[in-house]
Amino acid sequence: MNLFISILAVIASIFILFKYLHSNLIPEIVTLFNLLLNGKKTLGEIISVDQEKGIDGSVIFRAAIKFYDNLGKEFSFLTQFQFMAKPLVGSTLRIIYDPKNPKEASIYNLGTFLFPLLNLFLLVFASVIIIVTILKFEF
Protein backbone atom coordinates (compact mmCIF):
# COMPACT_ATOMS: atom_id res chain seq x y z
CA MET A 1 0.00 0.00 0.00
CA ASN A 2 2.78 2.46 0.94
CA LEU A 3 4.68 1.70 -2.27
CA PHE A 4 1.50 2.23 -4.28
CA ILE A 5 0.91 5.65 -2.68
CA SER A 6 4.54 6.65 -3.32
CA ILE A 7 4.36 5.63 -6.97
CA LEU A 8 1.03 7.42 -7.38
CA ALA A 9 2.47 10.63 -5.82
CA VAL A 10 5.52 10.51 -8.13
CA ILE A 11 3.33 10.00 -11.19
CA ALA A 12 1.05 12.87 -10.14
CA SER A 13 4.06 15.17 -9.58
CA ILE A 14 5.53 14.32 -12.97
CA PHE A 15 2.15 14.78 -14.68
CA ILE A 16 1.63 18.22 -13.10
CA LEU A 17 5.19 19.26 -14.05
CA PHE A 18 4.80 18.28 -17.69
CA LYS A 19 1.28 19.68 -17.94
CA TYR A 20 2.51 23.07 -16.73
CA LEU A 21 5.62 22.97 -18.92
CA HIS A 22 3.65 22.04 -22.02
CA SER A 23 0.82 24.52 -21.53
CA ASN A 24 2.70 27.61 -20.32
CA LEU A 25 6.43 27.72 -20.04
CA ILE A 26 7.69 25.75 -23.06
CA PRO A 27 5.62 27.72 -25.62
CA GLU A 28 6.82 30.97 -24.05
CA ILE A 29 10.47 29.86 -24.20
CA VAL A 30 10.08 28.71 -27.82
CA THR A 31 8.53 32.06 -28.80
CA LEU A 32 11.29 34.03 -27.06
CA PHE A 33 14.00 31.84 -28.60
CA ASN A 34 12.45 32.42 -32.05
CA LEU A 35 12.48 36.17 -31.39
CA LEU A 36 16.15 36.04 -30.44
CA LEU A 37 17.05 34.13 -33.61
CA ASN A 38 14.80 35.82 -36.16
CA GLY A 39 13.50 39.00 -34.53
CA LYS A 40 13.91 42.56 -35.64
CA LYS A 41 14.65 45.23 -33.06
CA THR A 42 12.93 48.60 -33.02
CA LEU A 43 11.58 51.17 -30.60
CA GLY A 44 8.11 50.89 -29.15
CA GLU A 45 6.03 53.50 -27.37
CA ILE A 46 4.01 52.83 -24.22
CA ILE A 47 0.42 53.75 -25.08
CA SER A 48 -1.35 52.63 -21.90
CA VAL A 49 -0.67 51.06 -18.51
CA ASP A 50 -2.84 48.54 -16.66
CA GLN A 51 -2.61 48.17 -12.89
CA GLU A 52 -3.03 44.74 -11.27
CA LYS A 53 -2.55 43.17 -7.87
CA GLY A 54 0.29 40.69 -7.51
CA ILE A 55 0.02 37.38 -5.68
CA ASP A 56 1.32 39.02 -2.52
CA GLY A 57 -1.10 41.96 -2.83
CA SER A 58 1.50 44.36 -4.22
CA VAL A 59 0.68 46.61 -7.16
CA ILE A 60 2.18 45.64 -10.51
CA PHE A 61 1.82 47.19 -13.93
CA ARG A 62 1.58 45.91 -17.50
CA ALA A 63 2.11 48.20 -20.45
CA ALA A 64 0.51 48.23 -23.89
CA ILE A 65 3.20 49.07 -26.43
CA LYS A 66 2.83 50.13 -30.05
CA PHE A 67 5.52 49.86 -32.68
CA TYR A 68 5.96 49.94 -36.43
CA ASP A 69 7.34 47.03 -38.45
CA ASN A 70 9.91 47.47 -41.22
CA LEU A 71 7.07 48.21 -43.69
CA GLY A 72 5.67 50.99 -41.48
CA LYS A 73 2.58 49.05 -40.35
CA GLU A 74 1.50 49.72 -36.75
CA PHE A 75 1.20 46.89 -34.23
CA SER A 76 0.64 46.76 -30.49
CA PHE A 77 0.99 44.21 -27.70
CA LEU A 78 0.48 43.91 -23.96
CA THR A 79 3.70 43.10 -22.14
CA GLN A 80 4.07 39.83 -20.30
CA PHE A 81 6.78 41.54 -18.30
CA GLN A 82 5.49 43.19 -15.14
CA PHE A 83 6.74 46.55 -13.95
CA MET A 84 7.10 47.31 -10.25
CA ALA A 85 7.05 51.08 -10.88
CA LYS A 86 4.39 52.59 -13.11
CA PRO A 87 5.82 53.15 -16.60
CA LEU A 88 5.18 56.51 -18.20
CA VAL A 89 2.76 56.61 -21.12
CA GLY A 90 4.63 58.03 -24.12
CA SER A 91 8.04 56.70 -23.10
CA THR A 92 9.93 54.44 -25.49
CA LEU A 93 11.41 50.98 -25.01
CA ARG A 94 13.50 48.71 -27.17
CA ILE A 95 11.40 45.84 -28.43
CA ILE A 96 11.94 42.81 -30.62
CA TYR A 97 9.31 41.37 -32.97
CA ASP A 98 8.97 38.53 -35.45
CA PRO A 99 8.95 40.06 -38.96
CA LYS A 100 6.88 37.10 -40.25
CA ASN A 101 4.36 37.55 -37.43
CA PRO A 102 4.71 41.04 -35.90
CA LYS A 103 2.00 40.25 -33.32
CA GLU A 104 4.72 38.16 -31.63
CA ALA A 105 6.68 40.90 -29.87
CA SER A 106 8.38 41.50 -26.55
CA ILE A 107 10.42 44.05 -24.66
CA TYR A 108 14.05 43.54 -25.60
CA ASN A 109 16.07 43.20 -22.42
CA LEU A 110 17.91 40.51 -20.51
CA GLY A 111 15.10 39.89 -18.01
CA THR A 112 12.59 39.11 -20.75
CA PHE A 113 14.68 36.17 -21.91
CA LEU A 114 16.31 35.15 -18.62
CA PHE A 115 13.23 34.86 -16.36
CA PRO A 116 11.44 32.07 -18.31
CA LEU A 117 14.65 29.99 -18.34
CA LEU A 118 15.18 30.59 -14.64
CA ASN A 119 11.54 29.67 -14.03
CA LEU A 120 12.05 26.41 -15.95
CA PHE A 121 15.16 25.55 -13.94
CA LEU A 122 13.48 26.25 -10.60
CA LEU A 123 10.37 24.29 -11.55
CA VAL A 124 12.37 21.22 -12.57
CA PHE A 125 14.61 21.53 -9.50
CA ALA A 126 11.61 21.78 -7.15
CA SER A 127 9.94 18.81 -8.85
CA VAL A 128 13.05 16.67 -8.41
CA ILE A 129 13.19 17.62 -4.72
CA ILE A 130 9.52 16.71 -4.28
CA ILE A 131 9.92 13.37 -6.06
CA VAL A 132 13.06 12.43 -4.09
CA THR A 133 11.35 13.40 -0.83
CA ILE A 134 8.29 11.31 -1.66
CA LEU A 135 10.43 8.29 -2.58
CA LYS A 136 12.45 8.53 0.64
CA PHE A 137 9.44 9.09 2.90
CA GLU A 138 8.48 6.03 4.86
CA PHE A 139 4.81 5.60 5.57
Image (cartoon, rainbow, N blue to C red):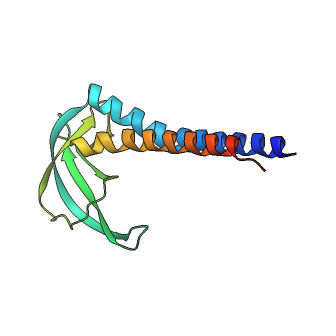
Q: Please tell me how many numbered marks the rendered image carries.
A: 0
Residue 37 in the image, given as x and y percentages of width and height: 28, 25
Q: Quadrant of residue 97?
A: top left
- In this rendering, is residue 111 above or below 61? above
Foreground residue among 48 and 55: 55
Q: Is residue 66 visible?
A: yes
Left or right of 35 on screen, residue 20:
right
Residue 64 in the image, given as x and y percentages of width and height: 27, 58
Residue drawn where x is 80% and y is 46% of the image: 5
Residue drawn where x is 53% and y is 40% of the image: 21
- In this rendering, is residue 43 above or below 65? above
Residue 77 in the image, given as x and y percentages of width and height: 31, 51
Residue 68 in the image, given as x and y percentages of width and height: 18, 43
Q: Quadrant of residue 95?
A: top left
The residue lying furthest to the right in this view is 1
Q: Quadrant of residue 48?
A: bottom left
Left or right of 26 on screen, residue 46:
left
- In this rendering, is residue 98 above or below 78? above
Foreground residue among 44 and 121: 121
Residue drawn where x is 41% and y is 32% of the image: 30
Q: Quadrant of the N terminus?
A: top right
Residue drawn where x is 41% and y is 70% of the image: 56
Left or right of 130 on screen, residue 51:
left
